[in-house]
Image (cartoon, rainbow, N blue to C red):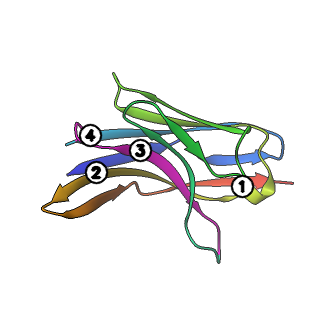
């Protein structure tokens, strides 16, 4: 099992910045990805950014050049630095960790989620 604890959400004005943190504990040694998703009211949860064990990153087009994901392996923590925030970034942000493994010929994925942290951007 993996436990994820998020922090850092809040209310900021458009154009401002926030940094979200996600501390992982438990069986983290075999995790393939960690990342952030978000869900705005009335919308589906969407990928924001992910980072692999080796440090490769991937971002949603809507946040490229504004958000940066990075990890501190010594602290088992992943961060999401969010700059130039827009009202459209308002959502609950969820930390995610994923383990991918093979069972026979079948590839499986276990997902773990944090409790979510609210980010609100005022115009």
**Marks 1 and 2, how far apart in space?**
27 Å
**Marks 3 and 1, how far apart in space?**
20 Å
Q: Which SS class for mark 2?
A: strand
Q: Percent from the top left, x then y, of residue 41? A: 65, 72
- Farthest residue, direction right: 123
The residue to which callout 4 is attached is 25
Can you tell which of label 3 and label 1 is closer to the viewer?
Answer: 3
Up the image or down, 17 lies above or below 104; here it is above
The residue at 47%/39% (across/down) is: 51
Can you tell which of label 4 and label 2 is closer to the viewer?
Answer: 2
Q: Which SS class for mark 4?
A: strand
- Give yes or no for contact between labels 4 and 2 (Cβ–Cβ under 8 Å): no
Residue 89 - label: 1
- The magenta stretch spans which residues? 28-41
The residue at 34%/31% (across/down) is: 76
Q: Percent from the top left, x then y, of residue 49? A: 56, 47
Can you tell which of label 3 and label 4 is closer to the viewer?
Answer: 3
Q: Report the front residue among 35 and 32.
A: 32
The residue to which callout 2 is attached is 99
Crowdedness near tag 4: few (<14), some (14–19) or many (≥20) residues, C-alpha within 10 Å: some
- Give yes or no for contact between labels 1 and 2 (Cβ–Cβ under 8 Å): no
**Marks 3 and 4, how far apart in space?**
12 Å
- Farthest residue, direction bottom: 42
């Amino acid at each position: 099992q993996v436990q994820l604890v998020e922090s850092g959400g809040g209310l900021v004005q458009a154009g401002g910045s926030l940094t979200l943190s996600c501390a992982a504990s438990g069986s983290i040694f075999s995790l393939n990805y960690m990342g952030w998703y978000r869900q705005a009211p009335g919308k589906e949860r969407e990928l924001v950014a992910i980072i692999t064990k080796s440090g490769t990153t991937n971002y949603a087009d809507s946040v490229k050049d504004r958000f940066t994901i990075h990890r501190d392996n010594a602290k088992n923590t992943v961060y999401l630095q969010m700059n130039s925030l827009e009202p459209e970034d308002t959502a609950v942000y969820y930390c995610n960790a994923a383990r991918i493994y093979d069972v026979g010929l079948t590839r499986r994925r276990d997902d773990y989620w944090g409790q979510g942290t609210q980010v609100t951007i005022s115009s």
